[in-house]
Image (cartoon, grey):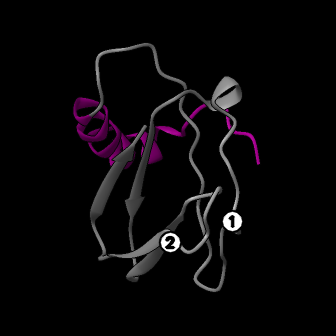
Amino acid sequence: MHLSGWSTEDAELLDPLLNRLNSLLPKVEKQTHILHLATNGEILPHIDNVEASGSWILGVSLGYPRIMRMENIADPVDSFELLLPPGSVYIQR
């Protein structure tokens, strides 16, 4: 879904969170994409398109704990998994 704005009620709840997250990022021009993952959803392995979405990615784990798996595309054995507890934030470049 593409959303171009928030309702007033939603903005009151989201703005403090988005402002806090924005303060964690480098002071560079940003594009914002928000993805909500359903409880039974998953993000399949992929390589992010930095031309389309920028070179910084900030992720927030809300709700249930999630496991993030990072894998070297040249050597899939070179990988690790990271538990993202609720409320955790990660930044990658």
Residue 35: image quadrant is: bottom right
Specify the quadrant that holds the C terminus: top left
Dot 2 amino acid type: Arg
Residue at coordinates 38% horizontally, 69% vertically from top-left? 62
Q: Contact (CB < 8 A) between labels 1 and 2?
A: yes
Residues 93 and 64: in front is 93
Residue 21 part of the magenta-drawn span: yes
Q: Is residue 53 above or below residue 47?
A: above
Q: Give the residue at mark 1.
A: 45
Q: Give the residue at mark 2.
A: 69
Q: Secondary structure at mark 2?
A: strand
x and y, in percent, of residue 17 in the image = 30, 46
Left or right for 59, reference 39:
left
Residue at coordinates 58% horizontally, 39% vertically from top-left? 33
Residue 6: image quadrant is: top right
Dot 1 amino acid type: Pro
- Which residue occupies the extreme right position in the image? 1
Residue 19 part of the magenta-drawn span: yes
Checking the image for residue 71, the label placed there is: none
Q: Residues within 10 Å of mark 2 (few under 14, many from 20)?
A: few
Residues 1 and 86: in front is 86
x and y, in percent, of residue 61 in the image = 39, 66
* Boundaries of the magenta span: 1-24
Q: CA distance from mark 1 to mark 2?
A: 9 Å
Residues 5 and 90: in front is 90
Q: Earlier in the sequence, mark 1 or mark 2?
A: 1
Left or right for 9, reference 13:
right
Q: Secondary structure at mark 1?
A: loop
Residue at coordinates 33% horizontally, 53% vertically from top-left? 90
Left or right for 78, reference 92:
right
Residue 52: image quadrant is: top right
Principal SS element in the magenta part?
Answer: helix
